């Protein structure tokens, strides 16, 4: 997966969790929680969807790395580099 | 034998919701249900080609599409449904009717505030302060105090006992497992769900909503076993190893989530759990009559979606010392919801408090006669307050605490379960958890969220943390 693919994978998770939100306008540098309405339940879902879809574990100490889209991509890209973006 | 990650007891809303969450995240899960229909307390039945919903008259917690922080919004996103999947039809207007005063309310909370200001001008400031306290209260927290008296808090803000009774009438009828008073956090759950959010009915009834959940659950690989009654929950050294069904089949499980009710669950544990003897059993139950009419209820003067009434100034929410208490009740008119096309037939549902103990006494023949007598008595009392509709009835049916016990397994037919709730769902058995009514989230949305929360908290979150 390239950085672009990783971004797409995260978007696809967000669309699943927040089907009513407009994800096309997400600004990568800003806090995700400020842009789409994510609570702690949603956050758990993002972590679990990553686990379900890509079999990667995000330990609790790293949750901060998932704050913005840019930081998500930076954090997840090395973990996902050998994966294909599933259709 | 490999067994299941989780066995869920009961295919009501909470059990199915827990099942969906777990199956979605690839857990091996089995829901066991003793009946041949799903739904538990909120289900449906068929008589003479008509399908009737039972359980709550309507869904509380209705919020429009886009509100993702509301309980309904949370439920939808957690189960990955769209708002329109549920096809919810909001109420028109409901009413709290007492001898001297009446308060109307809609799904717009501002409307009720105006009603209170008009009907109780001296109480509006206190009422608004109460609302402020309710707004900032985190009633869905899984921790925290459950012992604060709702009446105590109400009296701090509202000095007119009539307004207190009028506010309590719908709230207690729609979710209070305790007589006379209520735990404040439960009052907050119900206040928000009825007054600040609102009522709706699914377009095609509970049957449709339940089918939606069952289909989703199965499509995720969840197993559903109908007609599978639990004989025992086998808890060796404080830990469940398996669940044995009537007939002897033994299902192994890492975790068990039970929606049967706390005492009902503990009673099935082998070896027995001593706590079951001291755990309070719910007492509050209802008699309900369903009337199918030959015309629209509006033509007969029934223009509200739901009316909560008391024919006496003092509203008393308690187990009656007779079969039923006709001095208060709830009258629901399913036709008066905003359906895209009118329902095929007019219908009214009348609910009164009832005594499970007294309903268990009569013989079969006396029981049938008692149902007729009580129904007639309830109508007599109702018609001192509402227009007479008896000449328009084309079909009627009545159920009692006995019926509720038979179909839900709740002791005493206690619709809202035990007065003691376990917010975090834990039991004396390490890997056995409670969801549904006795966990303490109320109503259709509440029950569903209860299943979701327990699955998240006790299974999914643990998997992430370990």
Image (spheres, coloured by chain):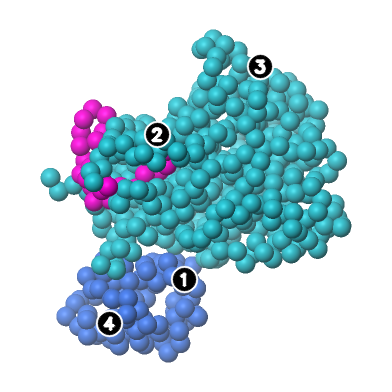
Of pointers 1 and 4, the one earlier in the residue sequence? 1
Dot 2 corresponds to which residue? Answer: B37
Where does the magenta region start and end?
A: B238-264
Mark 3–mark 4 Cα distance, whole angstroms, equals: 69 Å
Q: Give the secondary structure at mark 3.
A: helix
In the rendered structure, the answer to whether residue A77 lies left or right of residue B111 reads left
Q: Which chain is displayed in cyan in the rendered image?
A: B
Residues at discs 1 and 4 both on one chain: yes
Residue B303's quadrant in the figure? top right
From this viewpoint, which residue is outermost toward the left?
B1
Q: Position of residue B219 (x, y in %)?
A: 30, 51
Q: Is residue B255 magenta?
A: yes
Q: Position of residue A18 (x, y in %)?
A: 44, 68
In the rendered structure, the answer to whether residue B68 lies left or right of residue A9 reads right
Q: Chain of mark 4?
A: A
**Classed neighbour count for the residue bearing mark 4: other residues with Cα under 10 Å, few (<14), some (14–19), many (≥20):** many
Mark 3–mark 1 Cα distance, whole angstroms, equals: 52 Å
Dot 4 corresponds to which residue? Answer: A76
Mark 2–mark 4 Cα distance, whole angstroms, equals: 45 Å
Marks 2 and 1 in Cβ contact (< 8 Å) = no
Marks 2 and 3 in Cβ contact (< 8 Å) = no
Dot 3 corresponds to which residue? Answer: B373
């Amino acid at each position: 997966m390239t950085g672009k693919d990783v971004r797409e994978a995260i978007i696809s998770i967000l669309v699943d969790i927040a089907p009513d939100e407009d994800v096309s306008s997400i600004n990568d540098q800003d806090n995700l929680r400020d842009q789409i309405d994510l609570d702690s339940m949603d956050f758990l879902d993002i972590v679990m969807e990553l686990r379900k879809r890509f079999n990667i574990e995000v330990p609790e100490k790293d949750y901060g790395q998932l704050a913005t889209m840019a930081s998500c991509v930076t954090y997840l890209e090395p973990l996902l580099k050998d994966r294909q973006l599933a259709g | 034998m490999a067994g299941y990650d989780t066995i869920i007891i009961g295919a009501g809303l909470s059990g199915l919701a827990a099942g969906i969450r777990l199956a979605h995240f690839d857990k091996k899960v089995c829901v066991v249900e003793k009946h041949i229909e799903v739904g538990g307390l909120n289900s449906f039945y068929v008589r003479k080609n008509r399908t009737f919903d039972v359980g709550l008259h309507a869904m509380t917690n209705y919020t429009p599409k886009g509100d993702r922080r509301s309980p309904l919004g949370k439920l939808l996103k957690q189960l990955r449904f769209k708002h329109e999947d549920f096809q919810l039809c909001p109420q028109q207007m409901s009413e709290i009717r007492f001898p001297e005063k009446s308060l109307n309310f809609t799904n717009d909370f501002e409307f009720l505030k105006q009603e209170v200001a008009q009907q109780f001008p001296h109480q509006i400031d206190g009422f608004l302060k109460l609302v402020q306290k309710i707004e900032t209260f985190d009633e869905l927290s899984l921790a925290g105090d459950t012992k604060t008296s709702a009446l105590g808090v109400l009296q701090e803000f509202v000095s007119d006992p009539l307004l207190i009774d009028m506010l309590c009438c719908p709230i207690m009828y729609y979710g209070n497992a305790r007589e006379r008073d209520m735990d404040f956090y439960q009052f907050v759950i119900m206040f928000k769900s009825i007054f600040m959010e609102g009522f709706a009915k699914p377009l095609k009834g509970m049957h449709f909503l339940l089918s939606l959940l069952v289909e989703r659950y199965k499509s995720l690989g969840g197993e559903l076993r109908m007609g599978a009654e639990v004989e025992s929950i086998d808890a060796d050294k404080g830990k469940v190893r398996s669940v044995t069904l009537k007939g002897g089949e033994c299902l192994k499980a890492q975790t068990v989530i039970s929606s049967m009710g706390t005492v009902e669950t503990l009673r099935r544990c082998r070896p027995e759990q001593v706590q079951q003897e001291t755990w309070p059993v719910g007492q509050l139950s209802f008699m309900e009559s369903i009337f199918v009419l030959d015309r629209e209820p509006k033509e007969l003067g029934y223009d509200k979606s739901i009316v909560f009434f008391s024919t006496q100034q003092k509203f008393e929410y308690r187990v009656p010392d007779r079969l039923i208490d006709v001095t208060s009740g709830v009258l629901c008119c399913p036709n008066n919801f905003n359906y895209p096309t009118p329902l095929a037939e007019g219908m009214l549902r009348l609910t009164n408090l009832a005594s499970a103990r007294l309903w268990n006494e009569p013989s079969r023949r006396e029981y049938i006669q008692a149902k007729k007598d009580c129904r007639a008595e309830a109508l007599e009392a109702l018609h001192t307050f509402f227009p007479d509709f008896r000449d328009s009835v084309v079909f009627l049916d009545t159920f009692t605490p006995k019926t509720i016990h038979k179909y839900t397994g709740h002791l005493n037919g206690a619709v809202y379960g035990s007065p003691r709730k376990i917010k975090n769902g834990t039991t004396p058995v390490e890997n056995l958890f409670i969801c549904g009514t006795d966990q303490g989230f109320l109503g259709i949305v509440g029950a569903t969220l209860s299943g979701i929360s327990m699955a998240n908290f006790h299974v999914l979150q643990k998997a992430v943390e370990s």
